[in-house]
């Protein structure tokens, strides 16, 4: 399955939707000048497609294997990870004080987009590490930063996030892992950690020299619920003050999940302190662990939304290649009875155009979101609040659309799509996790209709939709969708009950995301006559047309679902759902 | 993963949508009186859930294995198939002259619905056998029927359909397998078959005593393309005139596909005549093989549409059970902070109601279609033509909705849904084949907008939509959807180019299917106050409300996609789709 990095479309999105030139005008991001941006986007595309993509199918087949407490990665992963670290890709957006390049999040996003398109399961390793790095950067003490950040930023060490427990999935307030202060001895001032965590991505492996686990746990006498959770740093190997690695900490991977997809990524059940000797350090203030986790969650959610783009891009490329190659049947209605490549058949074209339009629409939304995050870092509070609206949109709609595109990719392949060797099936399996993790899409939509709609009494959301309506002049369908979203947002905020809002939250989230994506695609069109992108112009015009003419009206068709309210959902009692 | 047969809802659909009472009023189907119908629906439900369902997950894990030319089925399959045959389930709709019960197709449909809900991969064995039986029944000679039908009807022998070759997928005209007349000797009057066929479901196995392969091949000097294809009966073991089994025929399974789902079902590459000694008999007239195949395809397509119902039912039951059991988070906005079962959260309810509404809507459409087929068998030509319209609707929309419901089933399970042990993932994998086989959904939609829309100059389709609009009084959304479909159908038939029609065919097919399903759900509501079904009334009212209020408006949102035409699909040339 060939794969060509979508370098030109990524650069277009980075320019038109993230406005990288605007970012580079700041002192902080001055290094993000055009040559640097181009070098990064081209470089990571070549690296990912050259070194990580060839391991995608073999990694799926081999999977990660737990062998007496050690996780063995598929062949080739260790070397490919080492090259990734050596070439400095992990350090793109890391803090300069600790060896990072301090470039915009937008470019770190691009690194992950490329890695994930090449090999989604593998890309989770750096994705999770970046999350841990950010949490430490924002909440760690100076000593912790000095000790742990340099190797996390370089990628020599990896990081994990340990939230979930069997009884506490989306409801983190229910978690039970404990942390007991150590009063004396070698570890005085630290904590004894005990508990089991599940769904820990890349929780154990041998690709990095050390693994820094960030673990949510409760101090003795902590308040119940989410206000009693603290964050702890728990290294796989203890680290001496001079940075050298010491003894193994008392933590281990006790089993791996047998999953539908992302087989190369070990999803670990982690056990901390089975022998009473698991030592961790507090990160940030006591009982403020959840807030520290939320810091990194925003960016992680954007990167998961990016997985929709990734699976969409890979699936589209595979389907296009197959459809151009596979000769089957003459064109319907043609006098010429010679069989043609199936890409010439109208419904195959419809599927391919839909895959392309959804993928490029997701990408436009992704980089617009990343750009707003970077503006927020520069102190632009309006951009930061807008980013807060955009995060659930790219996470939820991006990942749903990613699954849809992967499924269409199978369909274009016909019977061959159902055969694992073709590779389309793996994308369909891998893509399916993204609507679930980092907060299910239902939770994203709930976040949108509760906290995010309420920002500045609704002005942030309304302002976004107003911008779209103003900017999309001439495109009546898009203007109407934005206006409808604005009105539903107002109804939700001012009139609807909380249940009514939640009942319509997912369709409303989809509608809003499509509106923003359509708008950002239009912004790409306005940029495209620029010499750098002129080569994309014809294809982009066709893609945007398809998006506006078909995907936007479909989203408008969700209006009834968004506003139907909750009452009809509660007519049945729970038992009546069963046969 | 528990599973309870949907007996009551099936009986409701068989009464309200297939009008079984009307069928039983005929002489031919007089045996289908209420007690018999109930005994069948209850009996097969118990058999399937009791004996086949427990083999679903283990069958997926073990898969079918090719071992030196022999296919080994997962443990328990042989015994479970023997019980199925012994209890007479295979013979429900078979011709009475050959040991069948001669009951309506509607009831055979119900047998397969139950078997497939229990174990989709396993159910393909009888499903394909029924197709072979029908082809022989309609096109075989009296001698062939007498020799082969009794054991096919009972299920002691199974049947296959051999259409596809590597270079000839959907385009059967391109196939190359050959049949050479044998002039003299023991097999004089028969044919020597040679060629390779792919994607042969249950093409080799040990569960039945013999396998009757129906093989499409070309006679010497046959015309090119689809007018030069003949149908041959090729037994795994030769059958003497007295019915005893003779030597092995020269045919074998050379490999099995490694598939995304339906692992227990061997998908065979079959090789005929490697040693020059594969003997077959002509079925029907020379060069008329395709027509014989089409005879059985209609019913096979309905049974594949039923797989949407099957996966939908199983996924819904699993998700409901999980959501009632899994306690997580308090109700949003409630003063009571006690965690509740997740079925109490609005968005989980929305997903479950959607799964239920889609599944029951598919089932209503399924049995309405089956009932029209049975009316056609009784000589009602209007019903037969209506069935022709309905077949692509249930096949295409049913299987697409089946995939959607299976995917929602994963989502309701959250992280657990991605773990194979839970069983939700298998449904998502298994369901994905249904939009592909028996004619991809694109081919179904093409059939709808070309041949089917043209029936009686469009009057058959328009009449269906008129019936819906007339009958759905008060439900403005449904009336409007039917009216829109009618208008699009007219535009397609009278004004649109063939390309424009094909470009909008899939969304148009979805819209039409949703209109019919919504209508048939309303018909269920009108039947339900009948004492037999009163227990379903509350749940059904809620489900129908959900379908009409949310799914119908979404389908209406496809209007733009159905009418956008082909021009925008051909702006790009094939090369411009690639990166």
Image: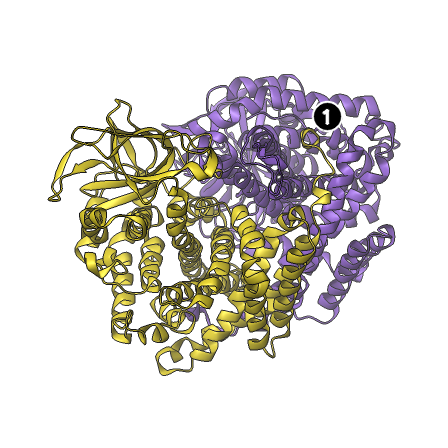
Chain colours: A purple, B yellow
| Left or right: residue B121 compared with residue B449 | left
Residue A182 seen in this snapshot: no
Measured as percent of width and height from the top left, residue A548 is found at 75, 49
Vertical relation: A119 (above or below) B550 = above
Measured as percent of width and height from the top left, residue B161 is found at 34, 42
A8, B388: nearer the viewer: B388
| Left or right: residue B472 compared with residue A24 | left
B175, A260: nearer the viewer: B175
Sort mark 1 into few (<14), some (14-19) or many (20+) by Cα contacts within 10 Å.
many
Q: Chain of mark 1?
A: A
Vertical relation: A341 (above or below) B378 = above
- Please give the name of the residue rendered at 60% of the width and 19% of the height, measured from the top-left corner: A50
| Left or right: residue A480 compared with residue A208 | right
Q: Please give the residue where the numbered disc 1 appears in the rendered image.
A: A41
Total residue callouts = 1
- Please give the name of the residue rendered at 81% of the width and 44% of the height, measured from the top-left corner: A522
- Please give the name of the residue rendered at 65% of the width and 31% of the height, measured from the top-left corner: A112
Q: Quadrant of residue B283?
A: top left
Indicate the quadrant containing the N terminus of chain B: top left, top right, bottom left or bottom right. Answer: bottom left
| Left or right: residue A273 compared with residue A457 | left
Q: Is disc 1 placed on a helix, strand or loop?
A: helix
Measured as percent of width and height from the top left, residue A245 is found at 53, 21
Q: Quadrant of residue B263?
A: top left
Residue A254 seen in this snapshot: yes
């Amino acid at each position: 399955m060939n794969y060509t990095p979508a370098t030109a479309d990524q650069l277009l999105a980075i320019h038109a939707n993230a406005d990288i030139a605007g970012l580079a005008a700041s002192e902080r991001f001055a290094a993000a000048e055009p040559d640097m941006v181009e070098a990064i986007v081209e470089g990571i595309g070549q690296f990912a497609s050259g070194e990580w993509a060839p391991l995608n199918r073999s990694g799926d087949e081999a999977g990660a294997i737990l062998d007496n407490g050690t996780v063995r990665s598929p062949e080739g992963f260790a070397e490919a990870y080492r090259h990734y670290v050596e070439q400095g890709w992990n350090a793109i957006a890391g803090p300069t004080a600790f060896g990072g390049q301090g470039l915009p999040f937008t470019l770190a996003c691009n690194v992950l987009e490329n890695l994930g398109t090449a090999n989604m399961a593998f890309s989770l390793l750096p994705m999770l590490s970046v999350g841990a790095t950010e949490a430490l950067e924002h909440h760690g003490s100076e000593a912790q930063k000095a000790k742990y950040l340099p190797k996390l930023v370089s990628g020599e060490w990896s990081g994990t996030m340990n939230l979930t427990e069997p009884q506490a999935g989306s409801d983190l307030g229910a978690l039970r892992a404990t942390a007991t202060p150590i009063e004396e001895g070698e570890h005085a001032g630290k904590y004894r950690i005990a508990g089991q965590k599940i769904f820990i991505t890349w929780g154990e492996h041998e690709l990095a020299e050390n693994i820094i686990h960030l673990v949510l746990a409760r101090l003795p006498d902590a308040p119940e619920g989410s206000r009693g959770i603290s964050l702890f740093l728990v290294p796989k190997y203890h680290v001496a003050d001079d940075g050298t690695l010491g003894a193994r900490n008392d933590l281990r991977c006790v089993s791996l999940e047998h999953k539908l997809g992302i087989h190369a990524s070990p999803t670990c059940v982690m056990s901390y302190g089975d022998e009473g000797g698991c030592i961790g350090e507090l990160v940030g203030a006591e009982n403020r662990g959840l807030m520290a986790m939320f810091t990194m969650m925003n960016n992680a959610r954007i990167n998961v939304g990016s997985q929709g783009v990734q699976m969409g891009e890979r699936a589209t490329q595979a389907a296009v290649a197959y459809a151009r190659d596979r000769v089957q049947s003459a064109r319907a209605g043609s006098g010429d009875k010679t069989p043609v490549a199936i890409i010439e058949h109208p419904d195959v074209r419809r599927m391919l155009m839909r895959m392309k339009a959804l993928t490029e629409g997701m990408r436009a939304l992704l980089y617009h979101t990343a750009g707003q995050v970077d503006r927020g870092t520069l102190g632009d509070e309006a951009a930061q609040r807008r980013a807060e609206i955009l995060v659930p949109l790219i996470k939820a709609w991006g990942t749903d659309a990613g699954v849809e595109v992967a499924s269409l990719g199978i369909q274009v392949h016909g019977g061959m799509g159902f055969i694992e060797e073709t590779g389309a099936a793996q994308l369909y399996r891998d893509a399916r996790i993204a609507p679930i993790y980092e907060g299910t899409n239902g939770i994203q939509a709930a976040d949108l209709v509760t906290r995010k709609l309420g920002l500045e009494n609704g002005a942030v959301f309304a302002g976004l939709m107003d911008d779209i309506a103003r900017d999309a002049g001439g495109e009546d369908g898009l203007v109407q969708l934005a206006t409808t979203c604005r009105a539903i947002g107002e109804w939700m905020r001012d009139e609807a009950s909380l249940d009514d809002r939640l009942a319509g939250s997912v369709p409303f989230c989809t509608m809003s995301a499509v509106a923003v994506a359509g708008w950002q695609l239009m912004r790409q069109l306005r940029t495209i006559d620029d010499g750098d992108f002129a080569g994309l112009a014809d294809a982009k015009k066709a893609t945007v047309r398809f998006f506006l003419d078909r995907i936007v009206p479909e989203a408008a068709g969700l209006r009834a679902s968004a506003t139907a309210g909750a009452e009809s959902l509660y007519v049945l009692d729970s038992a009546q759902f069963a046969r």
